[in-house]
Image: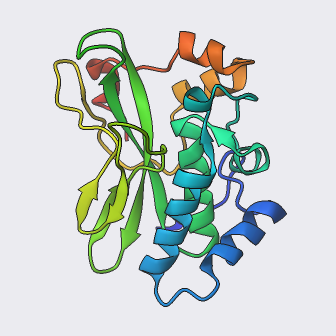
Amino acid sequence: MHDYLSASSIIDFDHPEVLATAHRLAAGAGSKADIVRACFAFVRDEIAHSADYRRNPVTCRASDVLRHRTGFCYAKSHLLAGLLRANGIPAGLCYQRLATGDSTAPYCLHGLNAVYLADVGWYRLDPRGNKAGVDARFDPPREALAFAAHGPGEGDLPGIHAEPLPVVTEVLERCGSYQEVLACLPDLAPGEYDAKP
């Protein structure tokens, strides 16, 4: 579990603002599940999804997502992983491949999280942010994700990653506006991700 509890350049929960927020959200919690619920609700509801709100700047590091209160799904998952790890709760990153239109190409990756709960095991949760047609919740052991990846060409990428996929961070660090990100959303074809850890 060490890798899922560690800070890094992207999941920088050792940043003072991230640590302070993590501890504030955990204050008074009766259980680890209560801490997860509080951190999840904070990122889902208080951090604006960059595309939904047409908001810049483009963020990637957990501390930048917190500071600017905005991020794409990937960046929001970085912050949630950081808040959970700061509270000693193992957390990783997961990805889905989704159609960007009406169940056909083009496709893009969607970022979400997995958290380790002692009584459930690894459990996926999606802090993307709710809107019409999207109702993601923390409701273990039942998954209540933002999207179902069931269409042709769609799917859940295998594995729980301790660090973001390079294809994701490359887009977030290169693009200067949310419009640029939307024009080049990260994607991996099925043959490219089958072998990923």
Q: Which of 130 and 3 lies nearest the eye of the viewer?
A: 130
> In this orientation, does residue 169 appear?
yes
Name the residue located 30 percent from the left edge and 9 percent from the top edge: 105
Q: Image height check: is 17 above or below 164?
A: below
* Quarter of the rendering containing residue 54: top right
115 horizontally vs 140: left or right: right
Horizontally, residue 61 falls left or right of residue 82, namely: right
Regarding residue 3, the answer to whether it shows in the image is no
Instruction: Give the mark count.
Output: 0
Residue 136 drawn at (x, y percent): 36, 51
List x then y, in percent, for residue 56.
73, 28
Q: Residue at x 48, y 61 (%)?
A: 91
Q: Which residue sits furthest front?
A: 132
Residue at image point 49% right, 20% down? 186
Q: Residue furthest right?
A: 16
- Relative to 180, say whether 48 is above or below: below
Q: Position of residue 45 (x, y in %)?
A: 55, 53
Q: Relative to 153, say whether 130 is above or below.
A: below
Picture quadrant where residue 33 is located: bottom left
Depth order, front residue of 26/189: 26
Quadrant (top left/top right/bottom left/bottom right) for the C terminus: top left
Closer to us: 189 or 63: 63
> For residue 7, what is the image quadrant?
bottom right
Percent from the top left, x then y, of residue 36?
48, 70
State left or right for residue 151 relative to residue 107: left
Q: Residue at x 50, y 51 (%)?
A: 162
